[in-house]
Amino acid sequence: MKKLLLLLIALCIGHLSFTQNLLEPIDIFDIEYVSDPQVSPDGSQIIYTRNFKDIMTDKNLSNLWIINADGTVNRPLTTGNQNDRSARWSPDGNKIVYLSNKDGSSQIYLRWLDSGSESKLSNLQKGPSNLTWSPDGKWIAFSMFVDGKPKVLASLEGKPKGAKWNEPAIYIDDMKYRADGAGYLKQGYRHLHVISADGGTARQITSGDYNFNRGEWSPDGKHLLTSTNMHPDRETTPRNSEVHLIEIESGDITTLTDRFGPDANPQFSPDGSMIAYMGSDDNYDGYQVAELYVMNADGSEKKLLSGNHDRSINDFAWSEDGQSLFISNDNEGDIQISSITLNGNVNKMIDGAGGVSIGRPYAAGSFSVGGNDVIAFTHGGPDHPSDLGVFRNGVIKRLTQLNEDLFSIKDIGEVEEIWYESSYDGRKIQGWICKPPGFDPNKKYPLMLEIHGGPFATYGPWFSSEVQLYAAAGYVVLYTNPRGSSSYGKEFGNLIHHNYPSQDYDDLMSGVDEVIDMGYIDEDQLFVTGGSGGGVLTSWIVGKTDRFAAAVVAKPVINWYSFVLYADNPATFYKYWFPGKPWEHLEHYMKRSPISLVGNVTTPTMLLTGEEDYRTPIAESEQYYAALKLNGVESAMVRIPGASHGIAARPSNLMAKVANILAWCEKYRKKSMP
């Protein structure tokens, strides 16, 4: 009887193993992830932001949670359908300040950790950000947008009382007058403020036509360390920022750096004797590596620490004794945290410090350092978005598994890393293959090539809801880091300097051939998509080859001439990505524009862009769509209402993007495919 029972159980298990529960677009609302982990001053506790989504309001929301550094007593600090974020420990570790919109607008809150009591410190008209405590715990510095006076060239007279005229004309004379995600910009600038930890009226510290984003307190509590661009030509040369020291009482500013290039994110050493900061010499390269520097507190004896590292520094923090720093950087798609000595010696400590980008597999994450040099970090991987990780006493430990409830009942695709040679020059290119759940190497599958944006960005071994949803629909998904991608050093990134698109096309096609050679791809069922820089390359690809059964070009640049004059950073793109202004180099601009190849396109092609995208404005998609229609190419255009360049800012928009891409590809996919 017992043997019969065991046989029945085995048969049931065998049956269940063939019953797949695949990821669906609606499951996006169930995905959670950790961000902004903050270690307490004594290293014993960690506060982190737990991000989730509300299906009824279509919003990304967040609460604060706290956990012991050994992984015990994980519990919420805040609850509710709101955005609680940016928690920062007081110097004594007894309190935190954080930002929340629980009362309808973003404000600063103080919470006592022993009692759970709270105080709303601010009642500001604009949203604060970048909270930092003074060393004595009595003040909080923050940055906030301060309105300026609207510019008016002419005013209208004679409006009768009660008349309903149109809104006044908007006068613009700024170089940068709109920004993706923000729309048309209001007059004003971000300035530093301080507010008492007991509440009250905030005091503005900085002034002028400059943007100050963050202030770090000096150990004596009398100064704020910051960075901004105060040069007279800052409108046309926006990347030339310097490090400044501001006296809080008087507002006097001392400038500590003077080289041409961005200097940013300054931080005092624990004893206040030194300042570390990030920056680079600006040579107008398309890809520039952010380096780590130190100098004396008075700005003297500047020293480059990371010169032999050849990886762009994402962020850094001082060690407790001030004798070294901890740095994070992207490396071959991964995010690593290392220590670096004041002599520039680097020792890698942590891999997998990312997972915050849940749409596409971009490398993104954060970390903090507390007492005893305990490091808390976002801990991601190909099979899960970021959880909370901790590094203590030389040991890495994953403290949370936020999506265990979802992934315990959903089958996801296995991700495999590959390296292959480019057909152009034999250069090694890194990529990843995501296989459909239940993958059978003896079957033939359609292939989806998914291309990252940037172009100076990096994909990596991270969970991606888009990639996983394509795999769930039966596609083998290939994503790679062609030349120009970051995380492989300065030389690799600048292979496309003034040369984009170019041989990155060969890198991508070589990746497709590499996967086909593995024997499980139907060569008649190749599909391609990509967003932003990936949209550029997708439209370039269909202009160069007819190998693909269908393509989806998401938020692309089609015409570089129109893009550099219409995108939200007109002072930047022409200077770094091209040899000069478009009318001075018309042939070069057109040679790199996918619109120049539109006459070759026969691949069924769909355009997909947010209607409020000011980074790659929808006019780029519209002109390509018109050209395809004029040439009789099977084509369509999908417009995402209210969406900026970051289409996935709302969960339903991410769903819409994936659903439309899959629907377009399904039109041209053999129905007998797995």
Image (cartoon, rainbow, N blue to C red):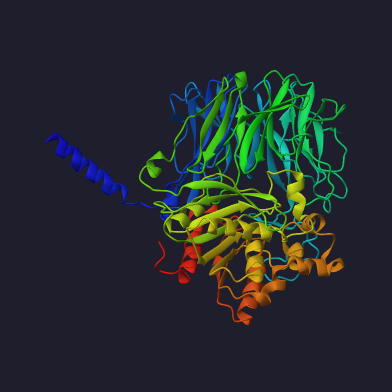
- In this orientation, which residue lies closer to the viewer: 263 or 331? 331
Residue 122 horizontal/vertical position (percent):
60, 36
Above or below, 585 against 344 in this view is below
- In this orientation, which residue lies closer to the viewer: 635 or 429? 429
Residue 542 appears anywhere in the view: yes
Residue drawn 59% across the image and 23% down it:
374
Q: Relative to residue 329, is residue 207 drawn left or right?
A: right
Residue 573 horizontal/vertical position (percent):
77, 57
Above or below, 659 against 626 in this view is above
Q: Quadrant location of residue 334? A: top right
Residue 498 horizontal/vertical position (percent):
79, 58
Residue drawn 19% across the image and 42% down it:
8
Q: Which residue is most to the left?
A: 1
Please identify the quadrant where the C terminus is shown: bottom left
Residue 610 appears anywhere in the view: no
Above or below, 238 against 5 in this view is below
Above or below, 537 against 31 in this view is below
Q: Relative to residue 470, is residue 424 drawn left or right?
A: right
Residue drawn 73% across the image and 48% down it:
492
- In this orientation, which residue lies closer to the viewer: 315 or 144? 315
Please identify the quadrant where the N terminus is shown: top left
Q: Quadrant location of residue 539? A: bottom right
